[in-house]
Image (cartoon, grey):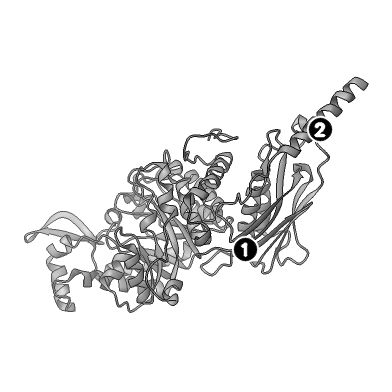
Protein backbone atom coordinates (compact mmCIF):
# COMPACT_ATOMS: atom_id res chain seq x y z
CA UNK A 1 0.00 0.00 0.00
CA UNK A 2 2.85 2.36 0.90
CA UNK A 3 4.42 1.69 -2.47
CA UNK A 4 1.13 2.58 -4.28
CA UNK A 5 0.83 5.81 -2.26
CA UNK A 6 4.36 6.86 -3.24
CA UNK A 7 3.53 6.20 -6.92
CA UNK A 8 0.35 8.26 -6.61
CA UNK A 9 2.25 11.17 -4.99
CA UNK A 10 4.87 11.05 -7.78
CA UNK A 11 2.10 11.25 -10.37
CA UNK A 12 0.57 14.22 -8.54
CA UNK A 13 3.92 16.04 -8.58
CA UNK A 14 4.34 15.31 -12.30
CA UNK A 15 0.83 16.50 -13.10
CA UNK A 16 1.32 19.68 -11.09
CA UNK A 17 4.40 20.40 -13.20
CA UNK A 18 2.27 19.92 -16.31
CA UNK A 19 -0.23 22.47 -14.98
CA UNK A 20 2.45 25.08 -14.48
CA UNK A 21 3.71 24.65 -18.03
CA UNK A 22 0.30 25.01 -19.71
CA UNK A 23 0.20 28.39 -21.50
CA UNK A 24 -2.73 30.77 -21.26
CA UNK A 25 -5.38 29.40 -23.61
CA UNK A 26 -8.53 30.89 -25.09
CA UNK A 27 -7.34 34.50 -24.81
CA UNK A 28 -10.01 36.50 -26.62
CA UNK A 29 -11.39 33.12 -27.67
CA UNK A 30 -14.97 34.32 -28.03
CA UNK A 31 -16.65 34.49 -31.45
CA UNK A 32 -17.99 36.98 -32.38
CA UNK A 33 -15.43 39.16 -30.58
CA UNK A 34 -17.01 41.06 -27.66
CA UNK A 35 -16.88 44.87 -27.63
CA UNK A 36 -14.54 44.72 -24.63
CA UNK A 37 -12.81 41.63 -23.26
CA UNK A 38 -9.98 41.47 -20.73
CA UNK A 39 -8.46 38.16 -19.67
CA UNK A 40 -5.56 37.19 -17.44
CA UNK A 41 -3.43 34.09 -16.96
CA UNK A 42 -5.25 33.32 -13.68
CA UNK A 43 -7.29 30.22 -14.34
CA UNK A 44 -9.80 28.20 -12.40
CA UNK A 45 -10.62 24.52 -12.64
CA UNK A 46 -14.22 23.42 -13.10
CA UNK A 47 -15.89 20.17 -12.10
CA UNK A 48 -19.29 19.24 -13.60
CA UNK A 49 -20.45 17.96 -10.16
CA UNK A 50 -19.62 21.25 -8.48
CA UNK A 51 -20.84 23.55 -11.25
CA UNK A 52 -24.22 25.29 -11.28
CA UNK A 53 -26.23 28.10 -12.84
CA UNK A 54 -28.40 30.21 -10.57
CA UNK A 55 -30.45 33.41 -10.61
CA UNK A 56 -29.01 36.44 -8.82
CA UNK A 57 -30.96 37.64 -5.79
CA UNK A 58 -31.66 40.96 -7.51
CA UNK A 59 -32.77 39.33 -10.80
CA UNK A 60 -36.28 40.09 -12.10
CA UNK A 61 -36.25 36.61 -13.67
CA UNK A 62 -36.14 33.67 -11.26
CA UNK A 63 -36.63 29.89 -11.43
CA UNK A 64 -39.57 29.18 -13.73
CA UNK A 65 -38.30 31.55 -16.44
CA UNK A 66 -38.76 29.29 -19.49
CA UNK A 67 -36.02 30.85 -21.63
CA UNK A 68 -33.29 30.81 -18.98
CA UNK A 69 -34.25 27.53 -17.27
CA UNK A 70 -33.90 25.80 -20.64
CA UNK A 71 -30.68 27.71 -21.44
CA UNK A 72 -29.07 26.59 -18.15
CA UNK A 73 -29.70 22.93 -19.02
CA UNK A 74 -28.60 23.41 -22.62
CA UNK A 75 -25.36 25.19 -21.76
CA UNK A 76 -24.47 22.71 -19.04
CA UNK A 77 -24.50 19.99 -21.73
CA UNK A 78 -22.53 22.21 -24.12
CA UNK A 79 -19.86 23.05 -21.53
CA UNK A 80 -19.56 19.46 -20.22
CA UNK A 81 -20.50 17.30 -23.24
CA UNK A 82 -18.82 14.14 -21.95
CA UNK A 83 -20.20 14.33 -18.45
CA UNK A 84 -22.60 11.70 -17.20
CA UNK A 85 -23.50 11.52 -13.53
CA UNK A 86 -21.36 9.05 -11.66
CA UNK A 87 -18.79 8.72 -14.49
CA UNK A 88 -15.63 10.79 -14.39
CA UNK A 89 -12.28 10.61 -16.09
CA UNK A 90 -10.08 8.42 -13.88
CA UNK A 91 -7.26 10.98 -13.89
CA UNK A 92 -9.38 13.68 -12.24
CA UNK A 93 -8.77 12.50 -8.67
CA UNK A 94 -5.10 13.29 -9.10
CA UNK A 95 -5.75 17.01 -9.49
CA UNK A 96 -6.19 19.34 -6.54
CA UNK A 97 -9.83 19.15 -5.44
CA UNK A 98 -11.88 21.55 -7.63
CA UNK A 99 -13.98 24.14 -5.81
CA UNK A 100 -17.66 24.82 -6.44
CA UNK A 101 -18.30 27.21 -9.32
CA UNK A 102 -21.53 29.18 -9.65
CA UNK A 103 -22.70 31.23 -12.63
CA UNK A 104 -25.09 33.85 -11.27
CA UNK A 105 -27.46 35.42 -13.83
CA UNK A 106 -29.29 38.68 -13.12
CA UNK A 107 -31.83 40.24 -15.46
CA UNK A 108 -33.36 43.70 -15.01
CA UNK A 109 -36.67 42.99 -16.76
CA UNK A 110 -38.34 39.58 -16.71
CA UNK A 111 -39.83 39.08 -20.21
CA UNK A 112 -39.46 35.29 -20.08
CA UNK A 113 -42.60 34.46 -22.02
CA UNK A 114 -42.34 36.97 -24.85
CA UNK A 115 -40.56 36.98 -28.17
CA UNK A 116 -37.41 38.86 -29.13
CA UNK A 117 -38.12 41.86 -31.35
CA UNK A 118 -36.37 44.68 -33.20
CA UNK A 119 -35.94 46.67 -29.98
CA UNK A 120 -34.62 43.84 -27.79
CA UNK A 121 -31.61 44.79 -25.68
CA UNK A 122 -28.95 42.09 -26.15
CA UNK A 123 -26.21 43.74 -24.10
CA UNK A 124 -24.60 41.94 -21.17
CA UNK A 125 -21.69 42.20 -18.72
CA UNK A 126 -19.80 39.08 -17.66
CA UNK A 127 -17.27 38.86 -14.85
CA UNK A 128 -15.42 35.58 -14.22
CA UNK A 129 -13.43 35.24 -11.01
CA UNK A 130 -12.46 32.55 -8.51
CA UNK A 131 -15.44 30.27 -7.86
CA UNK A 132 -18.01 32.39 -9.65
CA UNK A 133 -19.13 34.17 -12.79
CA UNK A 134 -21.59 37.06 -12.60
CA UNK A 135 -23.66 37.70 -15.72
CA UNK A 136 -25.83 40.84 -15.82
CA UNK A 137 -28.18 41.92 -18.58
CA UNK A 138 -31.26 44.06 -19.14
CA UNK A 139 -33.25 41.26 -20.82
CA UNK A 140 -33.23 37.48 -21.02
CA UNK A 141 -32.00 37.87 -24.63
CA UNK A 142 -28.86 39.59 -23.35
CA UNK A 143 -28.40 36.76 -20.86
CA UNK A 144 -28.53 34.22 -23.71
CA UNK A 145 -25.74 36.08 -25.51
CA UNK A 146 -23.71 36.18 -22.28
CA UNK A 147 -24.20 32.45 -21.64
CA UNK A 148 -22.95 31.74 -25.16
CA UNK A 149 -19.81 33.81 -24.52
CA UNK A 150 -19.29 32.10 -21.16
CA UNK A 151 -19.56 28.65 -22.76
CA UNK A 152 -16.80 29.56 -25.22
CA UNK A 153 -14.45 30.59 -22.40
CA UNK A 154 -14.36 27.06 -20.94
CA UNK A 155 -11.68 24.76 -22.33
CA UNK A 156 -10.19 21.33 -21.61
CA UNK A 157 -6.57 20.36 -21.22
CA UNK A 158 -5.07 17.18 -22.72
CA UNK A 159 -6.24 15.18 -19.69
CA UNK A 160 -9.89 16.16 -19.98
CA UNK A 161 -10.00 18.63 -17.07
CA UNK A 162 -12.02 21.81 -17.51
CA UNK A 163 -10.69 25.33 -16.99
CA UNK A 164 -11.48 28.94 -17.64
CA UNK A 165 -9.49 32.13 -17.15
CA UNK A 166 -10.26 35.23 -15.15
CA UNK A 167 -12.27 37.37 -17.59
CA UNK A 168 -14.18 40.64 -17.82
CA UNK A 169 -16.54 41.23 -20.75
CA UNK A 170 -18.70 44.24 -21.62
CA UNK A 171 -20.64 43.41 -24.76
CA UNK A 172 -23.48 44.48 -27.05
CA UNK A 173 -24.24 44.05 -30.76
CA UNK A 174 -23.19 46.63 -33.32
CA UNK A 175 -26.35 46.00 -35.38
CA UNK A 176 -29.80 45.01 -34.12
CA UNK A 177 -30.66 42.87 -37.19
CA UNK A 178 -28.26 39.96 -37.80
CA UNK A 179 -30.08 37.62 -40.11
CA UNK A 180 -29.73 34.35 -41.96
CA UNK A 181 -31.98 33.40 -44.88
CA UNK A 182 -32.86 29.79 -45.66
CA UNK A 183 -34.77 28.94 -48.83
CA UNK A 184 -37.17 26.02 -48.33
CA UNK A 185 -38.90 26.21 -51.73
CA UNK A 186 -36.17 25.30 -54.24
CA UNK A 187 -35.27 22.32 -52.07
CA UNK A 188 -37.35 21.22 -49.10
CA UNK A 189 -35.35 21.33 -45.87
CA UNK A 190 -36.51 18.82 -43.24
CA UNK A 191 -37.35 20.21 -39.84
CA UNK A 192 -34.23 18.77 -38.17
CA UNK A 193 -31.99 20.67 -40.62
CA UNK A 194 -33.71 23.97 -39.82
CA UNK A 195 -33.52 23.37 -36.05
CA UNK A 196 -29.83 22.39 -36.26
CA UNK A 197 -29.05 25.63 -38.08
CA UNK A 198 -30.99 27.65 -35.52
CA UNK A 199 -28.62 26.14 -32.92
CA UNK A 200 -25.62 27.16 -35.03
CA UNK A 201 -27.08 30.65 -35.45
CA UNK A 202 -27.30 31.05 -31.67
CA UNK A 203 -23.65 29.99 -31.30
CA UNK A 204 -22.68 32.88 -33.62
CA UNK A 205 -25.20 35.32 -32.07
CA UNK A 206 -27.36 35.65 -35.18
CA UNK A 207 -30.81 36.81 -34.10
CA UNK A 208 -33.12 36.70 -37.15
CA UNK A 209 -34.15 33.62 -39.13
CA UNK A 210 -35.45 34.92 -42.47
CA UNK A 211 -37.59 32.03 -43.64
CA UNK A 212 -37.94 32.22 -47.42
CA UNK A 213 -40.61 29.60 -47.07
CA UNK A 214 -42.27 29.60 -50.54
CA UNK A 215 -41.24 30.51 -54.12
CA UNK A 216 -41.79 29.44 -57.77
CA UNK A 217 -40.77 25.77 -57.43
CA UNK A 218 -42.89 24.80 -54.40
CA UNK A 219 -45.27 26.03 -51.70
CA UNK A 220 -44.47 23.89 -48.63
CA UNK A 221 -46.26 26.14 -46.08
CA UNK A 222 -49.53 24.43 -45.11
CA UNK A 223 -52.03 27.27 -44.88
CA UNK A 224 -55.10 26.95 -42.69
CA UNK A 225 -57.03 29.42 -44.81
CA UNK A 226 -55.95 28.09 -48.21
CA UNK A 227 -54.98 24.40 -47.81
CA UNK A 228 -54.81 23.88 -51.57
CA UNK A 229 -51.72 26.09 -51.77
CA UNK A 230 -49.59 23.27 -50.33
CA UNK A 231 -51.91 20.43 -51.44
CA UNK A 232 -51.25 21.40 -55.05
CA UNK A 233 -48.17 23.59 -54.81
CA UNK A 234 -45.76 21.60 -52.60
CA UNK A 235 -43.36 19.04 -54.09
CA UNK A 236 -45.45 16.49 -52.18
CA UNK A 237 -48.61 17.33 -50.18
CA UNK A 238 -47.72 15.13 -47.17
CA UNK A 239 -43.96 14.63 -47.01
CA UNK A 240 -42.67 18.01 -48.26
CA UNK A 241 -44.71 20.47 -46.23
CA UNK A 242 -44.44 22.47 -43.03
CA UNK A 243 -47.55 21.92 -40.95
CA UNK A 244 -48.80 24.53 -38.51
CA UNK A 245 -47.22 22.53 -35.69
CA UNK A 246 -43.88 22.39 -37.59
CA UNK A 247 -43.94 26.18 -37.92
CA UNK A 248 -44.78 26.58 -34.23
CA UNK A 249 -41.90 24.27 -33.34
CA UNK A 250 -39.45 26.35 -35.40
CA UNK A 251 -40.71 29.60 -33.84
CA UNK A 252 -40.42 28.21 -30.30
CA UNK A 253 -36.98 26.65 -30.91
CA UNK A 254 -35.86 30.05 -32.21
CA UNK A 255 -37.47 31.99 -29.33
CA UNK A 256 -35.61 29.88 -26.78
CA UNK A 257 -32.38 31.00 -28.45
CA UNK A 258 -33.32 34.66 -28.78
CA UNK A 259 -33.94 34.37 -32.53
CA UNK A 260 -36.78 36.09 -34.38
CA UNK A 261 -38.54 34.28 -37.23
CA UNK A 262 -39.39 36.57 -40.16
CA UNK A 263 -41.37 34.78 -42.90
CA UNK A 264 -41.18 35.80 -46.55
CA UNK A 265 -44.15 35.46 -48.88
CA UNK A 266 -42.59 36.90 -52.03
CA UNK A 267 -44.94 38.38 -54.64
CA UNK A 268 -45.97 39.43 -57.29
CA UNK A 269 -43.14 37.45 -58.96
CA UNK A 270 -41.77 34.13 -57.69
CA UNK A 271 -45.35 32.83 -57.34
CA UNK A 272 -45.67 30.01 -59.92
CA UNK A 273 -46.34 27.44 -57.16
CA UNK A 274 -49.09 29.66 -55.68
CA UNK A 275 -51.10 29.50 -58.90
CA UNK A 276 -51.46 25.72 -58.73
CA UNK A 277 -53.67 25.94 -55.65
CA UNK A 278 -55.27 29.36 -56.15
CA UNK A 279 -57.08 29.73 -59.48
CA UNK A 280 -57.18 33.19 -61.09
CA UNK A 281 -54.35 34.53 -58.90
CA UNK A 282 -51.68 34.63 -61.62
CA UNK A 283 -51.79 36.69 -64.81
CA UNK A 284 -52.64 34.66 -67.94
CA UNK A 285 -49.98 35.28 -70.59
CA UNK A 286 -51.10 35.91 -74.16
CA UNK A 287 -49.68 35.01 -77.55
CA UNK A 288 -51.24 37.56 -79.84
CA UNK A 289 -54.95 37.72 -78.98
CA UNK A 290 -55.25 34.34 -77.28
CA UNK A 291 -54.01 32.99 -73.93
CA UNK A 292 -50.84 30.93 -74.34
CA UNK A 293 -51.67 28.59 -71.44
CA UNK A 294 -48.79 29.88 -69.31
CA UNK A 295 -48.98 32.26 -66.40
CA UNK A 296 -46.88 35.17 -65.17
CA UNK A 297 -46.76 37.13 -61.91
CA UNK A 298 -49.73 37.73 -59.62
CA UNK A 299 -52.50 39.63 -61.45
CA UNK A 300 -52.50 43.10 -59.88
CA UNK A 301 -55.57 44.32 -61.78
CA UNK A 302 -58.35 42.30 -60.14
CA UNK A 303 -59.97 42.69 -56.71
CA UNK A 304 -59.84 38.94 -56.01
CA UNK A 305 -56.03 39.16 -55.82
CA UNK A 306 -56.15 41.72 -53.01
CA UNK A 307 -58.88 39.83 -51.13
CA UNK A 308 -56.74 36.69 -51.30
CA UNK A 309 -53.57 38.51 -50.17
CA UNK A 310 -55.42 40.17 -47.29
CA UNK A 311 -56.68 36.83 -45.97
CA UNK A 312 -53.26 35.21 -46.39
CA UNK A 313 -51.50 38.08 -44.58
CA UNK A 314 -54.05 37.92 -41.74
CA UNK A 315 -53.11 34.28 -41.28
CA UNK A 316 -49.39 35.15 -41.39
CA UNK A 317 -49.98 37.73 -38.64
CA UNK A 318 -51.69 35.08 -36.51
CA UNK A 319 -49.07 32.35 -37.09
CA UNK A 320 -45.83 34.39 -37.01
CA UNK A 321 -45.54 36.63 -33.93
CA UNK A 322 -42.72 38.86 -35.23
CA UNK A 323 -43.63 42.41 -36.17
CA UNK A 324 -41.71 42.11 -39.46
CA UNK A 325 -42.93 40.29 -42.56
CA UNK A 326 -40.96 40.09 -45.81
CA UNK A 327 -43.08 40.78 -48.89
CA UNK A 328 -40.42 40.19 -51.56
CA UNK A 329 -41.12 42.28 -54.66
CA UNK A 330 -37.98 41.29 -56.60
CA UNK A 331 -37.25 40.07 -60.13
CA UNK A 332 -40.71 40.67 -61.60
CA UNK A 333 -40.81 39.88 -65.33
CA UNK A 334 -43.07 42.34 -67.11
CA UNK A 335 -43.41 40.35 -70.38
CA UNK A 336 -46.58 38.51 -69.33
CA UNK A 337 -48.27 41.66 -68.01
CA UNK A 338 -47.34 43.37 -71.28
CA UNK A 339 -48.93 40.58 -73.32
CA UNK A 340 -52.25 40.64 -71.44
CA UNK A 341 -54.93 42.96 -72.92
CA UNK A 342 -56.77 43.33 -69.56
CA UNK A 343 -53.56 44.45 -67.85
CA UNK A 344 -52.88 46.97 -70.62
CA UNK A 345 -56.43 48.40 -70.23
CA UNK A 346 -55.89 48.70 -66.45
CA UNK A 347 -52.59 50.51 -67.04
CA UNK A 348 -54.35 52.99 -69.32
CA UNK A 349 -57.16 53.55 -66.83
CA UNK A 350 -54.64 54.21 -64.01
CA UNK A 351 -52.54 56.57 -66.13
CA UNK A 352 -49.45 54.34 -65.93
CA UNK A 353 -48.79 54.53 -69.69
CA UNK A 354 -46.43 51.69 -70.59
CA UNK A 355 -44.36 51.91 -67.40
CA UNK A 356 -44.82 48.53 -65.73
CA UNK A 357 -42.69 49.57 -62.77
CA UNK A 358 -45.65 51.80 -61.82
CA UNK A 359 -47.93 48.77 -61.89
CA UNK A 360 -45.62 46.83 -59.61
CA UNK A 361 -45.35 49.83 -57.29
CA UNK A 362 -49.16 50.08 -57.21
CA UNK A 363 -49.41 46.40 -56.23
CA UNK A 364 -46.65 46.54 -53.61
CA UNK A 365 -48.05 49.76 -52.08
CA UNK A 366 -51.44 48.04 -51.70
CA UNK A 367 -49.89 44.96 -50.03
CA UNK A 368 -47.73 47.09 -47.72
CA UNK A 369 -50.83 49.04 -46.66
CA UNK A 370 -52.41 45.73 -45.68
CA UNK A 371 -49.44 44.75 -43.53
CA UNK A 372 -49.42 48.22 -41.93
CA UNK A 373 -53.11 47.79 -41.06
CA UNK A 374 -52.12 44.49 -39.37
CA UNK A 375 -49.44 46.34 -37.33
CA UNK A 376 -46.65 44.64 -39.23
CA UNK A 377 -43.55 46.26 -40.69
CA UNK A 378 -42.85 45.31 -44.32
CA UNK A 379 -39.41 44.29 -45.56
CA UNK A 380 -39.00 44.34 -49.35
CA UNK A 381 -36.15 43.61 -51.75
CA UNK A 382 -34.44 46.70 -53.18
CA UNK A 383 -36.31 46.44 -56.52
CA UNK A 384 -39.40 47.93 -54.84
CA UNK A 385 -37.43 50.98 -53.75
CA UNK A 386 -35.65 51.27 -57.11
CA UNK A 387 -39.01 51.50 -58.90
CA UNK A 388 -40.42 54.00 -56.44
CA UNK A 389 -37.70 56.12 -54.84
CA UNK A 390 -40.16 58.48 -53.16
CA UNK A 391 -42.15 56.03 -51.07
CA UNK A 392 -45.48 57.00 -49.58
CA UNK A 393 -45.24 54.41 -46.82
CA UNK A 394 -42.37 53.41 -44.55
CA UNK A 395 -40.80 50.04 -45.11
CA UNK A 396 -37.45 48.31 -44.67
CA UNK A 397 -35.34 47.77 -47.79
CA UNK A 398 -33.10 44.72 -48.22
CA UNK A 399 -30.18 45.43 -50.55
CA UNK A 400 -29.29 42.29 -52.49
CA UNK A 401 -27.90 43.27 -55.90
CA UNK A 402 -24.19 42.98 -56.57
CA UNK A 403 -22.31 45.98 -57.94
CA UNK A 404 -22.22 49.19 -55.96
CA UNK A 405 -24.36 48.05 -53.05
CA UNK A 406 -23.01 50.89 -50.92
CA UNK A 407 -24.39 53.37 -53.48
CA UNK A 408 -27.79 51.75 -52.98
CA UNK A 409 -27.43 51.95 -49.20
CA UNK A 410 -26.75 55.65 -49.56
CA UNK A 411 -29.84 56.20 -51.76
CA UNK A 412 -32.16 54.21 -49.49
CA UNK A 413 -31.02 55.93 -46.29
CA UNK A 414 -31.19 59.34 -48.00
CA UNK A 415 -34.89 58.60 -48.62
CA UNK A 416 -35.26 58.05 -44.84
CA UNK A 417 -35.83 54.29 -45.01
CA UNK A 418 -34.27 51.58 -42.86
CA UNK A 419 -32.01 49.14 -44.68
CA UNK A 420 -30.60 45.61 -44.35
CA UNK A 421 -27.46 44.64 -46.28
CA UNK A 422 -27.40 41.18 -47.91
CA UNK A 423 -25.52 41.78 -51.20
CA UNK A 424 -21.99 40.84 -50.00
CA UNK A 425 -23.22 37.94 -47.85
CA UNK A 426 -24.59 35.49 -50.46
CA UNK A 427 -23.22 32.09 -49.40
CA UNK A 428 -25.15 29.70 -51.65
CA UNK A 429 -22.58 29.42 -54.45
CA UNK A 430 -20.05 26.61 -53.98
CA UNK A 431 -16.82 28.54 -53.52
CA UNK A 432 -13.91 27.48 -51.27
CA UNK A 433 -14.26 27.85 -47.51
CA UNK A 434 -11.13 29.99 -47.40
CA UNK A 435 -13.23 32.71 -49.08
CA UNK A 436 -14.60 33.49 -45.58
CA UNK A 437 -12.39 36.61 -45.49
CA UNK A 438 -14.39 38.26 -48.30
CA UNK A 439 -17.42 38.33 -45.97
CA UNK A 440 -15.30 39.36 -43.01
CA UNK A 441 -13.87 42.51 -44.58
CA UNK A 442 -17.26 43.94 -45.61
CA UNK A 443 -17.84 47.47 -44.24
CA UNK A 444 -21.61 48.04 -44.16
CA UNK A 445 -21.38 51.75 -43.28
CA UNK A 446 -18.61 52.72 -45.71
CA UNK A 447 -20.86 54.94 -47.83
CA UNK A 448 -20.99 58.73 -47.89
CA UNK A 449 -23.83 59.92 -45.71
CA UNK A 450 -24.80 61.63 -42.48
CA UNK A 451 -24.80 60.02 -39.04
CA UNK A 452 -28.60 59.94 -39.30
CA UNK A 453 -28.32 57.93 -42.52
CA UNK A 454 -25.91 55.45 -40.93
CA UNK A 455 -28.35 54.88 -38.05
CA UNK A 456 -30.91 53.66 -40.59
CA UNK A 457 -28.69 50.65 -41.40
CA UNK A 458 -30.28 48.18 -39.01
CA UNK A 459 -28.01 45.28 -39.95
CA UNK A 460 -27.21 42.61 -42.48
CA UNK A 461 -28.11 39.13 -43.56
CA UNK A 462 -26.45 35.97 -44.84
CA UNK A 463 -28.42 34.43 -47.71
CA UNK A 464 -28.42 30.72 -48.48
CA UNK A 465 -30.52 30.25 -51.61
CA UNK A 466 -31.64 26.74 -52.40
CA UNK A 467 -30.89 26.03 -56.09
CA UNK A 468 -27.90 23.84 -55.19
CA UNK A 469 -28.52 23.31 -51.47
CA UNK A 470 -30.52 20.76 -49.52
CA UNK A 471 -30.05 18.96 -46.20
CA UNK A 472 -26.98 17.07 -47.53
CA UNK A 473 -24.81 20.17 -47.91
CA UNK A 474 -26.64 23.02 -46.15
CA UNK A 475 -24.65 23.05 -42.90
CA UNK A 476 -21.10 22.75 -44.28
CA UNK A 477 -21.82 25.33 -46.95
CA UNK A 478 -23.06 27.79 -44.34
CA UNK A 479 -20.56 27.25 -41.55
CA UNK A 480 -18.00 28.53 -40.74
CA UNK A 481 -18.28 31.14 -43.55
CA UNK A 482 -21.46 32.57 -42.01
CA UNK A 483 -19.48 33.11 -38.79
CA UNK A 484 -17.42 35.74 -40.62
CA UNK A 485 -20.58 37.75 -41.33
CA UNK A 486 -21.75 37.19 -37.76
CA UNK A 487 -18.64 38.88 -36.36
CA UNK A 488 -18.93 41.72 -38.84
CA UNK A 489 -22.49 42.39 -37.70
CA UNK A 490 -21.86 42.01 -33.94
CA UNK A 491 -18.35 43.29 -33.23
CA UNK A 492 -16.51 46.60 -33.30
CA UNK A 493 -15.31 47.06 -36.88
CA UNK A 494 -12.12 48.84 -35.84
CA UNK A 495 -11.02 45.82 -33.77
CA UNK A 496 -11.96 43.18 -36.34
CA UNK A 497 -10.89 44.34 -39.80
CA UNK A 498 -7.76 42.16 -39.90
CA UNK A 499 -8.70 38.71 -41.23
CA UNK A 500 -5.23 37.31 -40.43
CA UNK A 501 -5.70 38.13 -36.74
CA UNK A 502 -9.21 36.66 -36.79
CA UNK A 503 -8.14 33.38 -38.41
CA UNK A 504 -6.87 31.56 -35.27
CA UNK A 505 -10.03 32.46 -33.36
CA UNK A 506 -12.26 31.35 -36.24
CA UNK A 507 -10.30 28.10 -36.52
CA UNK A 508 -10.84 27.48 -32.80
CA UNK A 509 -14.53 28.41 -33.06
CA UNK A 510 -14.96 26.04 -35.99
CA UNK A 511 -13.59 23.27 -33.76
CA UNK A 512 -16.13 24.23 -31.10
CA UNK A 513 -18.91 23.95 -33.70
CA UNK A 514 -17.73 20.42 -34.56
CA UNK A 515 -17.76 19.50 -30.89
CA UNK A 516 -21.35 20.77 -30.71
CA UNK A 517 -22.43 18.61 -33.66
CA UNK A 518 -22.34 21.27 -36.39
CA UNK A 519 -20.71 20.05 -39.63
CA UNK A 520 -18.60 23.15 -40.26
CA UNK A 521 -16.14 22.89 -43.14
CA UNK A 522 -12.40 23.12 -42.49
CA UNK A 523 -10.71 26.47 -43.10
CA UNK A 524 -7.30 25.02 -43.95
CA UNK A 525 -4.92 22.18 -43.12
CA UNK A 526 -5.08 21.14 -39.46
CA UNK A 527 -7.05 19.21 -36.90
CA UNK A 528 -9.46 19.66 -34.00
CA UNK A 529 -9.02 18.05 -30.60
CA UNK A 530 -12.62 16.86 -30.92
CA UNK A 531 -13.25 15.90 -34.54
CA UNK A 532 -16.80 15.70 -35.92
CA UNK A 533 -18.38 12.61 -34.44
CA UNK A 534 -21.34 11.59 -36.56
CA UNK A 535 -24.85 12.93 -36.96
Q: Identify the residue under disc 1.
A: 113
The crowd level at tag 2 (other Cα within 10 Å; few <14, some 14-19, many 20+) is: some
Looking at the image, which is closer to me, 416 or 54?
Answer: 416
In the image, what residue occupies the spot 72% across and 37% down? 21
In the image, what residue occupies the spot 66% across and 43% down? 155
Residue 462 pos. (x, y %): 42, 54
In the image, what residue occupies the spot 14% across and 64% down? 338
Q: Is residue 101 above or below residue 116?
A: above
| Viewer-nearest of discs 2 and 1 | 2
What label sits on residue 328 in the rendered view?
none
Q: Quadrant of residue 372?
A: bottom left
Looking at the image, which is closer to me, 532 or 174?
Answer: 174
Q: In this view, does 108 lie to the left or right of 416?
A: right
In the image, what residue occupies the spot 17% across and 73% down? 346
Q: Identify the residue under disc 2.
A: 94
The crowd level at tag 1 (other Cα within 10 Å; few <14, some 14-19, many 20+) is: few
Secondary structure under tag 2 reads: helix
Residue 350 pos. (x, y %): 18, 78
- Give the CA separation, mark 2 to mark 1: 45 Å
Residue 495 pos. (x, y %): 53, 59
Amino acid sequence: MAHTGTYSRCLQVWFSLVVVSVPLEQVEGVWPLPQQIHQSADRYSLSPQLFSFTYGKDSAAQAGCSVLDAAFKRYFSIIFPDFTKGAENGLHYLWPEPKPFVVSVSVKSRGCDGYPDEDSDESYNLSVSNGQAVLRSVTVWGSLRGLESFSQLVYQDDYGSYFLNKTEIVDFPRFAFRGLLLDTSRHYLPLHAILKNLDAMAYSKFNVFHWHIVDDPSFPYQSRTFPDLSNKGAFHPFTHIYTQSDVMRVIEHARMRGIRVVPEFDSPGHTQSWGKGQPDLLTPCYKGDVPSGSFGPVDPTVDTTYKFMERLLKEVKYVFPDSYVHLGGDEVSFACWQSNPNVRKFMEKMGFGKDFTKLESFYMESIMNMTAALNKTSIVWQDVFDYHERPRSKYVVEVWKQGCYLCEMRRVTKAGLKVILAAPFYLDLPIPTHSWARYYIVRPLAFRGTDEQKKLVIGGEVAMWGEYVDATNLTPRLWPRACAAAERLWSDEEKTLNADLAFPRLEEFRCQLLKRGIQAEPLFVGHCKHEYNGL
